[in-house]
Amino acid sequence: MIARITFCFAACLAWINASFALAETLNLGTLNEGIRSQMRVFQPLLTYLETDLEDSGITEVRLVVHPSTELMADAIARKEVDIFIDSPMVVAKVAQLSGGTPFLRHWKDGHAGYYTVIFTHVNSGITSLEDLQGRKVALEDHDSSSGFIVPVHMLIKAGLELKKLRAPSTSPSGNNVGYFLTYNDKNTMFAVASGRADAGATNQIRYLDLMEARPDEFRILAISDQYPRSVLMHRPGISKLLLDELRSSLKSMSDTNEGRTVLENFQNSTRFDEFAAGSKYTFAPIFEILQDLEDAGIK
């Protein structure tokens, strides 16, 4: 009888040890200045995944927020972040620095893809990108896909030379296109509307909102190619089993009422799915854009 109890205790202890061995925290990362606001955004998704991945050994899903691509890449390299969610150009920058791999598309705001719009006020006298020589452009920040990376690439490809201004009130020198950072889409739009900038850049979703609020006041100068709206990237060395379970969990969310509710509460999303043309093909032109910016001395 004692031997049987000893055996049962040993078996239970082995099961408990195995359970703790499987216990794992999944860390999701994104770029932002503050974690509190992002926690409100991400909490529905974190809670859903924590429950859905329980059988895979995940006991906690946490959010990790960093303010820059460099800090996020460092966190990924140290395995402090497993999955990174952000816009495609930002994900590409982090992937280059950390060795991560984009693996799923995120339909943020109900859109699979989006594009950049460079626009001006109708009274500016500007009708083309070439007319921006010696003018000022309002851009969001260095880690914004549609508000900085893509429009800067468009301007470079148009043969224009960009120079960062010391302040929004500073005038560009010569034929340079002077730019200043607004750190917010709304600030960019206001800068153009108020005449503080001769042109600005945003995505088509924000531009349509602007046109609805102030119809016939703005003119489009150029539109970019379309890129994924939002992207998920995984860190190097992540467990293939866990990655497969996570992929399946995210892709199946749109198949249930509970999943669709969580998606709607998380950035007004509609689904997660595979890249239509595959990850490598989708990101090839994105990596080329980053290389062109690096060659032009813009980071």
Image (tube, rainbow, N blue to C red):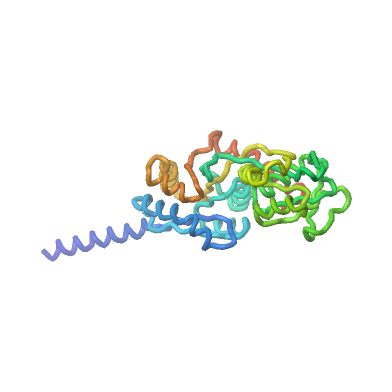
**Horizontal side of residue 242 vs 218, given as left or right:** left
- Determine the residue located farthest toward the right in the rendered image: 174
User: What percent of the width, then of the height, locates residue 161?
Assistant: 81, 47
Asked whether 113 or 289 is in front, the reply is: 113
- Determine the residue located farthest toward the bottom in the rendered image: 2
**Horizontal side of residue 83 vs 181, given as left or right:** left
User: What residue appears at the point 46 percent right and 59 percent down from the top-left corner?
Assistant: 62
- Determine the residue located farthest toward the left in the rendered image: 1
Q: In the figure, residue 77 lies in which quadrant?
A: bottom right
Q: Tell me if I can see residue 5 in this picture.
A: yes
**Horizontal side of residue 170 vs 6, given as left or right:** right
Asked whether 158 or 72 is in front, the reply is: 158
User: What percent of the width, then of the height, locates residue 271?
Assistant: 47, 42
- Determine the residue located farthest toward the top in the rendered image: 277
Q: Is residue 278 above or below residue 160?
A: above
Q: In the figure, residue 289 lies in which quadrant?
A: top right
User: What percent of the width, then of the height, locates residue 125?
Assistant: 82, 43
Count of labels shown? 0
User: What residue appears at the point 70 percent right and 53 percent down from the top-left corner?
Assistant: 190
User: What residue appears at the point 49 percent right and 45 percent down from the top-left corner?
Assistant: 269
User: What percent of the width, then of the height, locates residue 236?
Assistant: 53, 50
Q: Tell me if I can see residue 141 in this picture.
A: no
**Horizontal side of residue 182 vs 20, given as left or right:** right
Asked whether 130 or 276 is in front, the reply is: 130
Asked whether 252 or 278 is in front, the reply is: 252
Which quarter of the figure is the N terminus placed in? bottom left
